[in-house]
Image: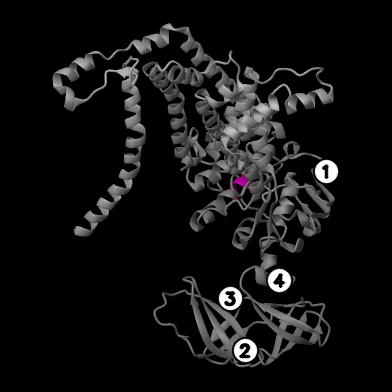
Amino acid sequence: MAKPLQTQNRRWIVTAIPYLWMVIFFLVPFFIVLKISFSNSEIAQPPYSPVFDLIVDGWDETLDKLASLTTDNYLRLIQDSIYSSSYLSSLWIAGSSTVMMLFIAYPIAYGMARAPKSWRPTLVMMVILPFWTSFLIRVYAWIAILSEEGLLNSALTWLGVIDEPIQILSTNMAVYIGILYSYLPFMVLPLYSNLEKMDDSLIEAAKDLGCTQIGAFWRVTFPLSLPGVIAGCFLVFIPAVGEFVIPDLLGGSDTIMIGKTMWEEFFNNRDWPAASGVAIALLIILMIPIMIFQTNEARQQEAGR
Amino acid sequence: MSAKALGPVRRKFAPWNDPSAVPLIKIRDVSKSFGSFTAVNNVSLDIYEREFFALLGPSGCGKTTLMRMLAGFETPSAGSISIAGEDLAGTPPHKRPVNMMFQSYALFPHMSVEKNIAFGLEMDKLPKGEISARVEEMLKLVKLEEFAKRKPHQLSGGQRQRVALARSIAKRPKVLLLDEPLGALDKKLREETQFELLDLQMALGMTFVIVTHDQDEAMTMADRIAVMNHGQFVQISPPAELYEQPVSKYVADFIGDINLVEGRVTKNERGHIVLGSEVTGGRIEASGETVAGLGDKAWLAVRPEKVSIDLQPPNDPTVNTASGTVWDIGYVGDISVYHVKLDNGGTMRASIANTRRVVERPISWEDKVFLTWAPDAGIVLTK
């Protein structure tokens, strides 16, 4: 009887570790941010109130402090149009880049999956290769490419497409280019892993039953690749909504994205409660696609069985 | 699915012996190479309407490549294929009057059973009413009416096989190609399905071309079997002829179990051959014809079930005899196979039907036995 109990205990430890990790590094910080989002901004250290300390304050004062928590920060999110336009602009930029990305990544992934088997590991390697360089450095490299004296403008001038340099850097265009470049592997890889394991005989069966090559693609290949499409879209869309580095470095003053607004709130205005409110609201907005993503994954696993 | 319910009963059917019969499928001098590898090497073949034709051979013999050329998935490197008088060169798979049932079934996982079956009909742009009527008919034919709304992954292996079959015959093709159709089923189900396929083929009056590596499957179902090896036909014959009159040691060995006894021709008169064999230590008489001349090397091929085994020497000393000791007994249930080490070296096998429940065998290990067979039990082969 002693032994099974021991194994049970050990099993409990194994499952507890990831939970503990999540509690310490995700749940606790989340609740701290949540609490700050209901606090008042102060010019103090820390820059918000109230600050709880159960031992010093005692029960009564703690209750008073609790009563002083406020929902003002959230009301401001609704009232001040800078926030709603930041959210909308972020969703729009992330959404439209995700759609553009799909059109770029699908042919790449399809081509990779159709390539001779011996080439495929190399092709996957080439997609992953940019990750070996720091993300920040790669975005800085784009500044050099997109600036008025940059590579792109010189190349276009040399080719005679344009007479004088056009402004690409510090526009939304540069933000799109940055997002498309940075997140491409996140779309290509799930699509590739889906298309690569597709059974060729399904396409042959479709042709055998009277489908043309293109018909077989739309009726068989594409519908079957939808889980890969959905996975890729969420892997791009979710982080792109909260993107800060790309709009900050490549975008202009008229590029508003929620990540940037949050950064300004936090560092420029030192308004921690407002920044926390922005963060919590963003989390809630993103919960919806994340939950759709998870149900999709679960359904796919169900079907795979 | 009984034969009675579906109409015609198996009849004598041999259009290949009728010089006036026009073949449905004509394969002429067809070769197919992949790089330096020749998968199919200059083969010609006629297949007739309503025939159940089997391509049989070990893996890599070219049978699947030949079938894929019929379906249009591979283009012949040389030669021509025509169906119903129409040359198929340059006709893509989706325009050919053939349908194929895939070894993996290739059911569309995102479509229900009825959608799978309707797929080909929808491609033909048939009216909606006709499609649903045809789908219903097919579901009934393969007894899957209650499973119409299920997805393939919710079905058992046998059910999936029947969906694949229904989908491939729904368009009523002139020719149905079946690539190892029963390969994924267990033995019992496979045997049942063999007869179901036969009944179905007769009821539909369709021409079936089946690719298989399973000789039992080919023997049970096919009107004719083409045995393939190294990209060529070794023999094309009805099952009984293939079994009783193989043209070579390869065919004899590939189909069923066989004893091959080496010898030299000492006499070759019309219909009567005598071999001198060191293996049996005597003369072997055989009936039949052979191209071998006197003194040439030849093999007597005799099936184990045509060899008698006895503890006593035969009364008639002129009968074909080989003596030896029982080395091993293979009990298979319905038959027992006796492996006999001959006195002159070499082994022969004799099989006996177990007509009674075996408690104690009259012949056992290490027994001295005599194997005998009639002159017309075996066939003399030269290659």
Can residue B200 be found in the magenta stretch? Answer: yes
Residue that numbered label 3 is attached to = B305
Residue that numbered label 2 is attached to = B322
Cα distance in 3D space between marks 2 and 1: 56 Å
The amino acid marked with disc number 1 is Ala
Vertical relation: B301 (above or below) B73: below
The answer to whether the residue labelled 3 contacts the one labelled 1, judged by CB atoms less than 8 Å apart, is no
| Circle 4 chain | B
Q: Are marks 2 and 1 on the same chain?
A: yes
Secondary element under disc 3, as helix, strand or loop, is: helix
Q: Are marks 4 and 2 on the same chain?
A: yes
Vertical relation: A173 (above or below) B186: above
The answer to whether the residue labelled 4 contacts the one labelled 2, judged by CB atoms less than 8 Å apart, is no
Residue that numbered label 4 is attached to = B250
The amino acid marked with disc number 2 is Ala
Cα distance in 3D space between marks 1 and 4: 33 Å
Secondary element under disc 1, as helix, strand or loop, is: loop
Residue A24 lies in quadrant: top left
| Circle 3 chain | B
Q: Nearer the viewer, mark 3 or mark 4?
A: 4
Q: Residue at x 50, y 27 (%)?
A: A238
How many residues crowd around disc 2 within 10 Å: few (fewer than 14), some, or many (20 or more)?
many
Q: Please state if A117 lies on the left or on the right of B310 as rendered.
A: right
Tell me, for residue B89, which label it has, or none.
1
Q: Residues in magenta? A: B198-203
Residue B238 lies in quadrant: bottom right
